[in-house]
Amino acid sequence: MNRFTVTHDTIALDAFRRGMDDPSCGAYVQFEGRVRNHNEGQPVLRLEYEIYEPLAVKEGERILDEALARYGVEKAAAEHRGGLMGLEEVAVVVGVSAAHRDEAFAACRYIIDELKIRLPIWKKEHYASGEARWVNCQRCASAHDQG
Amino acid sequence: MNRFTVTHDTIALDAFRRGMDDPSCGAYVQFEGRVRNHNEGQPVLRLEYEIYEPLAVKEGERILDEALARYGVEKAAAEHRGGLMGLEEVAVVVGVSAAHRDEAFAACRYIIDELKIRLPIWKKEHYASGEARWVNCQRCASAHDQG
Amino acid sequence: MRVKVRYFAAFRDDTGCSEEFVDSAGSTTGEVFEQCRSRHQGLHRHQASMVAVNDEMAQWDTPLADGDEVLFFPPVAGG
Amino acid sequence: MRVKVRYFAAFRDDTGCSEEFVDSAGSTTGEVFEQCRSRHQGLHRHQASMVAVNDEMAQWDTPLADGDEVLFFPPVAGG
């Protein structure tokens, strides 16, 4: 059973959450990354995610395993959408079930932070101006180039 | 429009989340407190929440306002269920929409922590043994009595 | 001074009572609680107990007026 | 040594190419990247660029063997 999945359709949030039920868990935390209508002052019309799936899935599963081991949570899963999507659509969802909320919050945060920096996934923003641009994380953009 | 609500039926999670959509927000964090099948080693069959609604709603709205002001998030809401409920049912849900995930996680965590200690809501656990017991937070139980 | 007192959750079990009227010589929430304790043997004020007056959270030294409604809350569910 | 090189996202735009074969005198991922740079003027190795070999994440000094598939990843979306 894959717990990290890639889809090119609308993420089925209801099915995702049903898969996270666990009778031993008193806490569930879910994070959703959605397409927002602006970035750095520019109006955004839609987003496009390119995903190199074989490695994204492998590394995604690894991150989920790390979260289970590190925080002792019961269940962790994530799904990332690829391709074009419009405003307010969900690009990525992360869910964690745990006995208590401390570890559920911590593990959910860990997973989304690691997914964002370790997975071969690239984001292209399409602006109202008609332009489109690949977007890197700000930390990376501000670092010096090596060559 | 009330953003903190009390219900005595199943919490309508889909409607709750739909109410949190915001085109300016790239991050959504949701916490769900569910009935788990054990507490301190005892098998639990169901939970009962007693809520003093007039004050719970007033104080709940205050906590949501605090979260909006403190973390600068766009939307925050919560719903608490009262009465009897079975295993895996959702007793409380908190949702926060924000431009970025840092403040969405922080605000969601703040809200559930404050709801748990400031709202006039009491929990009774019904055990497999047939017994039932009012449950206090462990911090409170371990503190000395005053009289 | 006559106030209405309401007990919730474990306090209702401890007193066998959900509400009652109290004629009090005391003038604060804490003094009225002590008077209720003398009436109901099982009632104890745990550290995390809370009190409200007329649907607003209050302190244990909040002054009361005739006709006030005083709500005694045992420790909440918390964690 | 002949390896297959694949470019993703901005790297594909920079090179105008999604994959190509490279006959390389070099022996590491970093050396092959330098060779590709000399072929494609627009290609730059930003600090957060990543490299994978045969669908496993690798380093810029990972040794290559004939027939390997080398994947060049520009900085990911992050934040």
Image (cartoon, coloured by chain):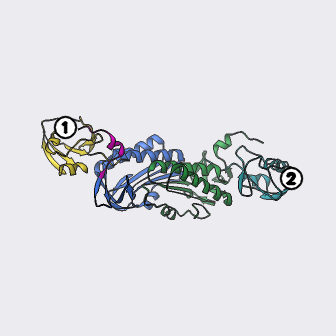
Chain colours: A blue, B green, C cyan, D yellow
Magenta residues span: A134-147
Q: Is residue C6 left or right of residue A29?
A: right
**Disc number placed over residue C24 in the picture, else none:** 2
Residue B78 vertical position relative to residue C62 in the rendered view, above or below? below
Q: Quadrant of the C terminus of chain B?
A: top right
Residue A139 on the magenta span: yes
Query: Where is residue B121, by image quadrant?
Result: bottom right
Name which residue type carries label 2: Ser
Name which residue type carries label 1: Leu
Q: Is residue A80 left or right of residue C42?
A: left
**Which of A51 and B68 lies nearest the eye of the viewer?**
B68
Pinpoint residue C48: horizontal percent, then vertical percent.
70, 45
**Which of A77 and A94 lies nearest the eye of the viewer?**
A94
Secondary structure under badge 2? loop
Q: Is residue A55 left or right of residue B79?
A: left
Answer whether residue B4 is visible to the viewer in this image.
yes
Q: Quadrant of the N terminus of chain B?
A: bottom right
The residue at the point 50 percent across, 44 percent down is A103
Secondary structure under badge 1? loop
Q: Chain of mark 1?
A: D
**Which of A82 and A100 lies nearest the eye of the viewer?**
A82
Residue B19 vertical position relative to residue C30 in the rendered view, above or below? below
Residue located beneath label 1 in the image: D64
Of discs 2 and 1, which sits in the foreground? 2
Pinpoint residue B62: horizontal percent, then vertical percent.
61, 54
Residue A137 on the magenta span: yes
